[in-house]
Image: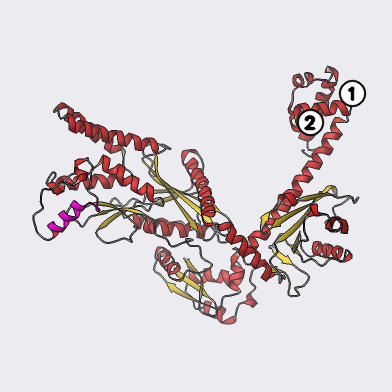
Amino acid sequence: MVPMEQVTPSIREQLEQVPDEPGCYLWKDASGQVLYVGKAKALRARMRQYVQGTDERAKIPFMMEQVAGFEYIVCSTETEALVLEKNLIQQFSPPFNADYRDDKSYPFIAIVEDDPFPAVKYTREKHRPGTRYFGPYTDARAARDMIDTMRKIVPLCQASCVEHKRLTRKLKAGAQPDDKPCFDYHVGLGPGPCCGACTEEEYAEHVRRCKRFLSGHRNEFVEVIRKDMEEAAAELDFERAARLRDRLAHIDALREKQKAVAGDTLNADVIGFFREETVCGVHVLVVREGRIINGNEFVLNKGLDVPRDDLVETFILHYYDAATDIPSLVLLADELEEVDALEDWLTTQRANAHGAKVHLRVPKRGEKAALVEMAQTNARHSLMRFKVRTRYEDDRINNALLQLESALALEAPPMRIECFDISTIHGRYSVASMVVFTAGRKDTSQYRRFKIRMETGEANDFAMMAETFARRYAPERMADGRFGSRPDLIIVDGGKPQLTAATRQLAELGLDIPVAGLAKADEELYVTWNEDGPIVLPNGSASLYLVKQVRDEAHRFAITYHRELRGRAMTASILDEVPGLGPKRKKLLLKHFGSFKKLREAGLEQLEVVPGIPVAVARNVHEVIRDFEAERAQGDVDPV
């Protein structure tokens, strides 16, 4: 948190003049760059949270160190503030706001309504007056395939058709069209206005039905086409009946591709998020009439480094500012704190003729909750595909190593990092782990683990760390090629005490290797050569992400070994109590069942048929294990 004395008096004085009305605020640095844009129901109260240190978001202290001034804009409603916030973020691209990772355009399906005979087209253009857009799609092939499928069910001219262009040009010039049919008319994909095969009223009905189809209303087509087909057959117009039959087949094929997930009445967008430290994948499942008709994926350039609500709200504002089909229900995984203004904005964007409100909901169970889980799973896969496609990991790792070199004042990027962690319970089964990251990636072949030899009745992390360093960095180990090369940076899990123990031991061994202690509470790095206190890596930076990843891996590796030792000790002690069970028979039992856990779960009948184990001994084993389970249920022993 930022103490009040760290904020310049001018800012505190200016805040007294800020009104408690809805609006947007812009925090700026000394050069006038906008660092962050936010909205508030009450501007003064919200902005005070930043300078008084009551805003608990991790990024705020780091940001406020750079703040030199602010601006604010008063709005009449919170919804107006929401829209203004979106526009200001687009205008200034503040570094502490979430936003899309890239500015590429996404495909749309468009119907050019201001043409005499509106045609359909695939486009990436910005929205133009006189054109109805459907999308966005993130898969260009899916958009083109949808156009092809739609035209097989409801014939409509394509904007790229030469004859349609000629017809449009003549009609706008007041000339009479000729009767030359296009190729699409011959194959049943166009209704034939170019040759007078349909009137403007008939074509307008085709356009209306295409809009309904692209909006996801597919079920209504089945009965209409089936009825037309029966009428054509009754009139002995078998050619037309065959065309209608083929259209029904196309609808059935489309329905088979689109997974049925709910009842026919469910129309919703389901949005899933998967966040990592500095990036986030988003997947939107478009559900219409109970079927998933489309799935769109996006990548945001912020992740765990910004509050979840900010990330979700930013995405919703961007996505539905471009989307043309907004359902009355949007499903999310988590509740948003300020949802009313967002719902009002979505309702306005939807502009439904019946005035239906858009609701943001978080389902807890049932098929809607399953849909949210599916969207989140797809968001994770979307992010993984993006990272592979763009080599995101390589760029992030390179940046992380360069940032660590600068922040820790190292002589070169730390290409080999060794990290240590201690795991113990009151000094029992104490172990230390050593994990190695080479060029920013896990190097599991270099991992080592140490069973602590010192005898202690209580946990003494500092002495244990000293023992570990004495063994790892002993001359014979440093000369042993199996332990790899000399590290460029050592990280110990803990603050100043662990750092002191490590550096003293290295000094006794005559080694000068940079060591940093990573404090768990505030993710601060303690080093001996910085007299200004701990080093704080920027929240959301690639360097902090790497350091935390190294620390978490060391912790995981230590815990795994610690549990393994406890399990072995407990297994041995329990089986040692079984009368008639010596080392050979114990080995036969464990080999037969594969693990002590499976042995514990075995019944008497299973124990009695183990080769080499007498029935009487098997019964003794069963009785001892049964007593052990009873004690464990009462909390008298630690679980294995």
Describe residue 232's horizontal placement relative to residue 569 as left or right.
left
> Could you tell me the amino acid type at mark 2?
Ala
Residue 16 included in the magenta stretch of the image: no
The answer to whether residue 99 is above or below residue 238 is below
The answer to whether residue 505 is above or below residue 422 is below
Q: What's the magenta bit mostly, secondary-structure-wise?
A: helix
Query: Toward the viewer: 388 or 636?
Result: 388
Give the extent of the magenta segment: 158-170
The answer to whether residue 244 is above or below residue 554 is above
The secondary structure type at the circle numbered 1 is loop
Q: Quadrant of residue 409?
A: bottom right
Rounded to the nearest angstrom, the CA distance separating label 2 from label 1 is 22 Å
Query: Toward the viewer: 610 or 160?
Result: 160
| Residue shown at the point (51%, 44%) measured from the top left | 373
Describe residue 550's horizontal placement relative to residue 127 as left or right.
right
Describe residue 556's horizontal placement relative to residue 580 as left or right.
left
> Could you tell me the amino acid type at mark 1?
Gly
Q: Position of residue 246 (x, y in %)?
A: 26, 33
Q: Position of residue 445 (x, y in %)?
A: 73, 49
Q: Residue farthest to the right? A: 455
Residue 161 included in the magenta stretch of the image: yes
Which quadrant does the N terminus fall into? bottom right
Crowding near pointer 2: few (<14 within 10 Å), some, many (20+)?
few
Q: Quadrant of residue 228?
A: top left
| Residue shown at the point (55%, 80%) measured from the top left | 30
Q: Earlier in the sequence, mark 2 or mark 1?
A: 1
Identify the disc placed on residue 580: 1
Which quadrant does the C terminus fall into? top right
Identify the disc placed on residue 630: 2
